[in-house]
Amino acid sequence: MISMLVTGGCGFIGSNFVHYVLEHEPDIHVINLDALTYAGNLANLADVANHPRYRFVHGDITDRDIVRTAMQGVHSVIHFAAESHVDRSILDSGPFIRTNVLGTQVLLDAARAAGVERFVHVSTDEVYGSLGPSGYFTEETPLAPNSPYAASKAASDLLVRSYVHTFHFPALITRCSNNYGPYQFPEKLIPLFISNLLRNEPVPVYGDGQNVRDWIHVRDHCAGILTVWKRGRVGEIYNLGGRSERTNLQLTHALLEALGKPKSLIRYVPDRPGHDRRYAIDCSKSERELGWHPAIAFEDGLRQTIDWYKSHADWIAAIRTGEYLQYYQRQYGSLVHDAS
Ligand code: NAD
Ligand code: TDX
């Protein structure tokens, strides 16, 4: 039995990953270290809370004592824990630097001291900056982060790189494009728009809606991370992407159509400051070297995701209270009143 420490397992991708590992890897015992920030939700893992190969540790990755204790006997670390929302990093970058940079450093030191054999650092294509109408991010693309979130992720990537170089620390880095799927917090485009539309509320499209994102189903991302953990080479970076580019407006129209809602629910709102125009991932290295491929077609994945949100009204309702409403008011202002 291998002991795998997953950080941020109560978030969107982390909880999908924990489910994926418990389903597919009978020889892995998962320890989930999560601080339960606004984005962490125990309900995401309620169905496996008593699983014999799963243990939850409530703690912050910047807390050296908690991390040292959680790291005991751990073979591998899969590091998801982060502040993950670009708009929140524009409102206040402090928590992003603390968790994403300092937290990663604390984890690296503890993992090194504990003799961890493999450390997968889960990063993002946003560290590469923004593309024009053509071209793709490869693993060789220079880092050019444009938001405080992206800068904090790039900083953590560079820290990981330095530990590999300086200490021969056995780390690998994944950089993935935009994920979608079950359990995604409804601040991100797809779950925000679905949950608003289910209540016949308007959806806020930033700028001209022509920004492009490359969408990947979260299960394909989880499979990619596990493949990198199994077969990746230490010190390497692996891009993961879905080969599914859509403008935000194309995506919005697809959501409206799938939910049978009118275009009049679209609201064009002021653009996100520093809004990256286009992301598109070249994931051919991961395909060629590791045999991983994104398998879920975007249309199928989107339909399944819409169905999941439709059938999890309680999960959404439990989130759309207190802190969420305050954030929504701060971020979208009058749209809140527009909705009532
Ligand atoms: P999320 O915001 O849904 O979840 C983050 C989780 O980390 C939460 O459970 C939260 O409680 C936990 N956390 C936050 N700060 C913590 C701390 N100090 N100590 C312990 N736990 C803490 O994020 P997500 O969308 O699931 O993203 C997970 C990772 O994947 C992040 O590192 C993100 O940068 C990366 N990533 C995300 C995407 C995407 O499209 N969402 C794409 C590529 C990479
Ligand atoms: O209300 C909105 N209106 C809107 O037009 C929101 C929330 C977003 N958008 C636009 C901005 C982006 O062009 O939609 C696109 C997607 O936005 P987000 O869902 O906020 O994702 P993005 O900023 O692209 O970053 C995501 O992908 C990379 C994740 O949040 C990151 O954690 C990941 O690293």
Image (cartoon, grey):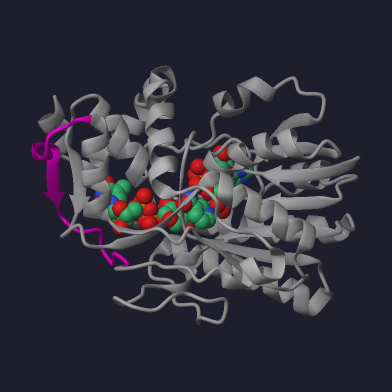
Q: Please, is residue 236 above or below residue 14 in the view?
A: below
Name the residue: 85% across, 42% down.
Answer: 3
Task: Please provide the residue range marked out in magenta.
Answer: 260-276
Residue 91 visible within the image: no
Residue 268 drawn at (x, y percent): 13, 50
**In the shown orientation, is residue 156 left or right of residue 312?**
right
Residue 88 visible within the image: yes
Q: Does the magenta segment cover residue 268?
A: yes
Name the residue: 64% across, 21% down.
Answer: 47
Name the residue: 72% across, 39% down.
Answer: 21
Residue 144 drawn at (x, y percent): 44, 77
Name the image quarter holding the N terminus: top right
Quadrant of res 320: top left
Q: Does the magenta segment cover residue 19?
A: no
Name the image quarter holding the C terminus: top left
Of residue 145 and residue 327, the one placed in the foreground of this image is 145
Residue 117 drawn at (x, y percent): 86, 59
Of residue 299 and residue 330, the one placed in the foreground of this image is 299
**In the shown orientation, is residue 208 left or right of residue 314?**
left
